Amino acid sequence: MDLGILDARLSEAEEDEGPENSTRNDITAALASATLAGSFCTSHKADGTSNLTPALPSQAGLCITSIGDVPLPLVPQHEKRIKSSKVSQLLNDECWQNTWSIDASKLTSKNPSWEVSVGNLAKSVAYKFVIRPNDLRADMNMLLYMEAGSRVDWCIDDEDSDEFVGVMYIQLPSAFTGGEANIFFGQNEDEGVTETFDLGAGGEAQFACHYLAHFADCEYSFEPILTGSRMLIRYSLM
């Protein structure tokens, strides 16, 4: 699902001279005054078939310290190596359940076009969030590995930075079912809006990258993975 570019609000944002860089307060105020539909989250397949979403390489050339090159979608051998590696950490907290994380410092991409493509995707997200593209960047945090039974209960991210705008997940080619993402924005259930994204589960997910982005003020959850496994790279939008 692509929530599109809100042309009227984008034109207003471009005409506003404002400060040189957007602040989190600016963006929070804009979000509060925006029409809810399409303003707080966005998701799409990133293979270039949509003229609103730039393509990400289907081959990220992912290499993990102590594991080596990682084929995508994952094969059982590498699923086991990721879970048993000394660089991975099992998350079982109030939000993330049965999920393994690997810090960004342990990740590299051998595909020279990967970083440029991620930068172009961040600009596309900025347009959809009615933010000037040059005012938004994506900082990689970690790799997340999820398998059957992995889930994320409702939670909200609040990084200790005034620059923190939101979160972007890039789902690498993965073969799985289940795992729908839910994004909620609002003061309460009666007045809020929830968007749900399947991220290509059971079909297109294994052939192309997908992305999901949302503002920091949103609550989110991931339904349990039913079969297979999923690889996500988490980025902070700053």
Image (spheres, rainbow, N blue to C red):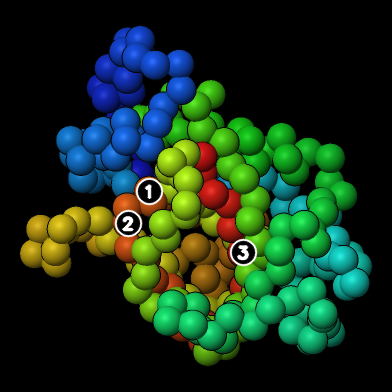
Of pointers 2 and 3, the one earlier in the residue sequence = 2
- Quote the CA–CA distance across marks 1 and 2: 6 Å
Of pointers 1 and 3, the one earlier in the residue sequence = 1
Instruction: Tell me whether the residue at label 1 lies in contact with that at label 2, contact meaning CB atoms closer than 8 angstroms.
Output: yes
Horizontally, is 11 left or right of 162 in the view?
left
Q: Is residue 132 visible?
A: yes
Q: Nearer the viewer, residue 174 or 168?
A: 168
Residue 215: mark in rendering? 1
- Quote the CA–CA distance across marks 1 and 3: 18 Å
Residue 232: mark in rendering? 3
Q: Amino acid at mark 1?
A: Phe
Q: Nearer the viewer, residue 137 or 58?
A: 137
Q: Amino acid at mark 2?
A: Cys
Q: Residues within 10 Å of mark 1 (few under 14, many from 20)?
A: many
Residue 218: mark in rendering? 2
Horizontally, is 67 left or right of 107 in the view?
right
Q: Nearer the viewer, mark 1 or mark 3?
A: 1
Would you place residue 117 above or below residue 173 in this image? Answer: above
Q: Residues within 10 Å of mark 3 (few under 14, many from 20)?
A: many
Residue at (59% x, 58% y) in the render? 234
